[in-house]
Amino acid sequence: MSEPLLLVEPRGHASRAFARLQVERLRSQSEIRDALERHRRQALWVAPHAPAVRLLLAALAGRSKGDQRLLSLEPANGARHGLLHAIFRFVVSADEGIRLLPTDQLALVLGSPNREDLFVGGAVAPDDATVILYGGSLEPLLVPLAWFRVRRGGPRPDPSRLTIADFGQTIRLGDYEAATDAILYEFDDAYRRRTKKRQIARDRSFGGALRRLRVQKGLRRTDFPGVTAKEVARIERGEVKKPHPSTLAALAKCLGVPAEKVATY
Amino acid sequence: MPFRVTLPEPWANRGWQVKIRDRERLEPPHVTILRRTRAWRVDLRSGKFLDKEPDPTEVPKEVVHEVRSNLQRLRQEWDRMFPENPVLSREAGDE
């Protein structure tokens, strides 16, 4: 279940892009403080412009923050940036190299029941070879740049040209496109649990999970020292229901995940 | 660069897309139908929808027809893009 969505819209500053969004609209300091009381545990606040950020800060400065998250379409640099981070647990704003979805797409994503399965923004930390992606709940997800593998004959990912596209369903690095589904499936345990429930028919065996994970990691059956390709194949086909703990440990080590996680893929 | 199936009008104009991107979940091989915030995966081995949510019946039959009539081409593209997990795969250890 997604957290409540609160749109800060001072009187006289209605945002056209968010006009059709089904959301609680807050127009004054008192409405903002009331909303904070009602949603003290967790809420996602949206500030579409500078007047909204100013109103929010005036209303909330010095208040206890809880698990409050802010999406600000207005860049917030310097002291204001520090203030926002003092109030909110997560702040995603159009600054610090963060690329957001186009506003019309952002409005649809925020109003979508599956917004936690979509990305709203992202940034590249080139020195750390990492892409930071922000889902619809604004939690950051770190993806190593190396994960965006170059396929034979395909385009090379260009980190300097990051965009979030297709209503948060695609990450573009220049001409290179990665599916949000593939990123979340690999890096987000909760997403894997949700997608499992949605599948019509699926090989739910340990072997099926092992095969999906191995293929996703780009490994061959011959890539597991100490375990023969034949044995890997037998496990994947379900001929070995429960691999020996030492075999499982060897597989998990090469796959780069804890042994108990293999079955979740 | 993703591989796209060019959809006829009015479907393309209404925001429907069919594509295989450069980085996908690799198993099972699939093509994705996208519209706005929703996506449907179609299995390239069977031609069937992989997920019950979102509801496959929401995809216009003309779009589904376009995918299924391009299945052979999509399989070839998948195999070209992801030779490590071809649609009809045989690997070391298979009997």
Image (tube, coloured by chain):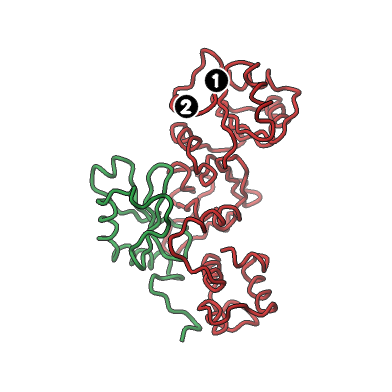
Q: At x 58% / y 54%, what residue is drawn?
A: A145
Give the quarter of the image for residue B77: bottom left
Give percent across and percent down for residue B78.
Answer: 38, 64
Give percent across and percent down for residue B12.
Answer: 29, 44
In the image, residue B20 above or below residue A46:
below
Q: Badge 1, how many Cα within 10 Å: few under 14, some, many 20+?
A: many
Report, in whole angstroms, how far the alpha carbon at label 2 lies from the one at label 1. 10 Å
Q: At x 49% / y 48%, what residue is drawn?
A: A171
In the rendered structure, the colour chosen for chain B is green
Q: At x 44% / y 65%, what residue is drawn?
A: B28
Q: Chain of mark 2?
A: A
Q: Nearer the viewer, residue A4 or A145?
A: A4
Q: Are marks 2 and 1 in contact (CB under 8 Å)?
A: yes
Task: Count all numbered tags in the image, as a single digit.
Answer: 2
**Residue type, label 2:** Phe
Q: Which mark is residue B52?
A: none
In the image, residue A82 above or below residue A234:
above
Instruction: Report the residue that reaches farthest toward the top.
Output: A12
Left or right, residue A15 beside residue A54 = left
Q: Where is mark 2, residue-wise?
A: A18
Element type at mark 1: loop
Q: Nearer the viewer, residue A250 or A42?
A: A42
Q: At x 52% / y 37%, what residue is drawn?
A: A100
Left or right, residue B56 beside residue A129 = left
The chain displayed red equals A
Element type at mark 2: helix
Which badge, 2 or 1, comes first in the chain's sequence? 1
**Residue type, label 1:** Glu
Give percent across and percent down for residue A221.
Answer: 54, 78
Q: Which mark is residue A9?
A: 1
